[in-house]
């Protein structure tokens, strides 16, 4: 049987992939989480895509999570004069917010930002492809000189790399999309342009008001320089983290990105939070059937850094080869994971996570067991998914089966390193549920009868956050062997 891949793959859904057959092929190729990007398309489009993902997962027989990525207070080009489709250094252009009375050649989203930008500041467009320096600002009507030329188009992003912006944590559209996400049963909601822990707290309060605080995991996207300065508090407040290298590479000098990526991943690993590395991972596969060698190395290095998940963006949303992009990332991940612990080859020395709770101590002990005896798998019997996420933090040497009676909890594990989500039947007997989990491990090919597995659970079962049991168990033998009539 093919070795289980531990790094998770997130694929963005868009016009190239929002079709039943294509999604089914992407699930079979290795997609673990489908990303719905609220920056593009309508609510009806998103609802249709979510339904197609759920149906594709059902047909293939795989647990697939859905991540709703909020647009956030992202400034974009709303419209521009046709003469600005390409600009050259030295050109002078006029910029204003959409709806301003004074005419301008380029209009941006209306968030009240432009009036605060001072002369001498840089404005970047299209992920930094075009840069201008502000010469004059008259109440938000800006005259600026192009210093780095290139192509411009509507809906491209606008960044202010050397300005501090007072942006709302959530826009009205974000509030509406949070409600839509809860109604649609998404598993993760990604918050764009997080600047501090209070931004995450605001989203969590909104979830509580809507009765969904325990149904969705919040992912903090690190893509502003303010977020780098407050990284520890943001990681502590979030349920998961995304290193969003697109806007981050515009907000801070590009030469800092590789080390910032490592630092953020290590911070999330230490806190036991799933961490996603995103943006331009296989960018050339938007148009080509195979990646560049540099892109393959980027994917491998993100895995070696400690990423739980890797994200494909335009490659699967609008690219010509969405299925091939997923399959390619799957192959690179599998090849890299074979040598991930070979420090002589990778020169990788990551600090070991510190146990801070009883559940952490159980996870650490289970991981030690997998490295000292021939345990084929770690079976986590979990109500909420917490036990399996704790195990993922410590990176055991054996695959983790996250067995839960709650399908939503199973989908929440699609982002966690090394965890194979498995829905089992809910019964009044913990012993019977353990037997069901061990039977699932056998069915999945993770262990054979008589082979050792490490069993982790919380007793009594059904009480969230009570991971307190660890047992080395031979499948089909011992205390949790199937009893007569089970």
Image (cartoon, helix red, strand yellow):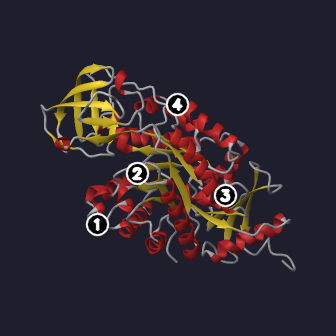
- Please give the label number shown on residue 290: 1
The answer to whether the residues at label 2 and label 4 have Cβ atoms under 8 Å apart is: no
Badge 3 element: helix
- Residue at (42% x, 62% y) in the render: 333
> Which residue is tagged 3?
409
Q: Quadrant of residue 236?
A: top right
Disc 1 to disc 4, C-alpha distance: 38 Å
Instruction: Say above or below: 198 vs 439.
Output: above
Question: Could you tell me residue 332's position as x and y percent?
Answer: 38, 63
Looking at marks 2 and 4 on the same chain, the residue that comes earlier in the sequence is marked by 4
> Which residue is tagged 2?
302
- Residue at (39% x, 60% y) in the render: 317
User: Can the viewer see residue 368 in this picture?
Assistant: no
Looking at marks 2 and 3 on the same chain, the residue that comes earlier in the sequence is marked by 2
> Which residue is tagged 4?
196
Disc 2 to disc 4, C-alpha distance: 25 Å
Disc 2 to disc 1, C-alpha distance: 19 Å
In this view, the residue farthest toward the bottom is 485
Looking at marks 1 and 4 on the same chain, the residue that comes earlier in the sequence is marked by 4
Disc 3 to disc 1, C-alpha distance: 35 Å
Which of pointers 2 and 3 indicates the residue nearer the eye? 3
User: Can the viewer see residue 126 in this picture?
Assistant: yes
- Residue at (72% x, 58% y) in the render: 382
Nearer-the-camera pick, 381 or 180: 180
The answer to whether the residues at label 1 and label 4 have Cβ atoms under 8 Å apart is: no
Nearer-the-camera pick, 105 or 343: 105
Which of pointers 1 and 4 indicates the residue nearer the eye? 4
Q: Quadrant of the C terminus?
A: bottom right
| Crowd rating for badge 2 (residues with CA inside 10 Å; few <14, some 14–19, many 20+) | many
């Amino acid at each position: 049987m093919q070795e289980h891949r531990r790094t998770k793959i997130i694929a963005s859904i868009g016009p190239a992939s929002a079709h039943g057959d294509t999604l089914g092929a992407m699930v079979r190729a290795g997609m673990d989480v489908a990303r719905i990007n609220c920056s593009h398309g309508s609510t009806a489009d998103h609802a249709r895509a979510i339904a197609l993902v759920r149906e594709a997962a059902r047909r293939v027989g795989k647990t697939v999570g859905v991540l709703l990525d909020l647009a956030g207070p992202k400034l974009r080009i709303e419209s521009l004069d046709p003469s600005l489709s390409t600009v050259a250094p030295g050109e002078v252009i006029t910029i204003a917010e959409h709806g301003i009375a004074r005419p301008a050649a380029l209009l941006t989203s209306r968030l009240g930002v432009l009036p605060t930008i001072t002369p001498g500041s840089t404005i970047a467009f299209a992920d930094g492809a075009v840069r201008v320096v502000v010469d004059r600002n008259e109440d938000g009507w800006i005259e600026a000189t192009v210093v780095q030329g290139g192509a411009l188009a509507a809906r491209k992003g606008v960044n202010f790399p050397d300005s501090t912006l007072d942006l709302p944590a959530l826009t009205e559209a974000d509030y509406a999309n949070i409600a839509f996400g809860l109604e649609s049963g998404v598993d993760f909601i990604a918050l764009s342009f997080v600047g501090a822990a209070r931004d995450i707290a605001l989203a969590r309060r909104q979830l509580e008001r809507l009765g969904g605080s325990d149904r969705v995991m919040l992912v903090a996207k690190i893509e502003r320089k303010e977020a780098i300065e407050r990284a520890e508090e943001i990681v502590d407040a979030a349920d998961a983290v995304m290193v969003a290298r697109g806007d981050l590479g515009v907000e801070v000098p590009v030469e800092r990105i590789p080390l910032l990526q490592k630092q953020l991943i290590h911070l999330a690993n230490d806190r036991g939070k799933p961490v996603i590395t995103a943006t331009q991972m296989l960018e050339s596969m938007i148009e080509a059937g195979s990646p560049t060698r540099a892109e393959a190395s980027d994917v491998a290095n993100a895995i070696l850094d400690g990423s739980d998940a890797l994200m494909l963006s335009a490659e699967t949303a609008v690219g010509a080869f969405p299925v091939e992009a997923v399959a390619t990332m799957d192959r690179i991940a599998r090849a890299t994971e074979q040598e991930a612990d070979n420090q002589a080859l990778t020169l990788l020395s990551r600090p070991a996570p510190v146990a801070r709770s009883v559940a952490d101590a159980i996870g650490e002990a289970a991981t030690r067991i997998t490295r000292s005896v021939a345990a084929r798998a770690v079976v986590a019997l979990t109500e909420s998914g917490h036990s399996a996420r704790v195990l993922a933090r410590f990176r055991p040497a054996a695959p983790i089966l996250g067995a839960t009676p709650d399908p939503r909890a199973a989908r929440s594990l699609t982002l966690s390193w090394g965890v194979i989500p498995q829905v089992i039947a809910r019964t009044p007997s913990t012993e019977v549920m353990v037997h069901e989990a061990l039977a699932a491990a056998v069915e999945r090919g993770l262990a054979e009868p008589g082979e050792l597995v490490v069993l982790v659970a919380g007793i009594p079962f059904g009480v969230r956050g009570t991971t307190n049991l660890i047992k080395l168990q031979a499948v089909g033998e011992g205390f949790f062997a199937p009893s007569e009539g089970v």
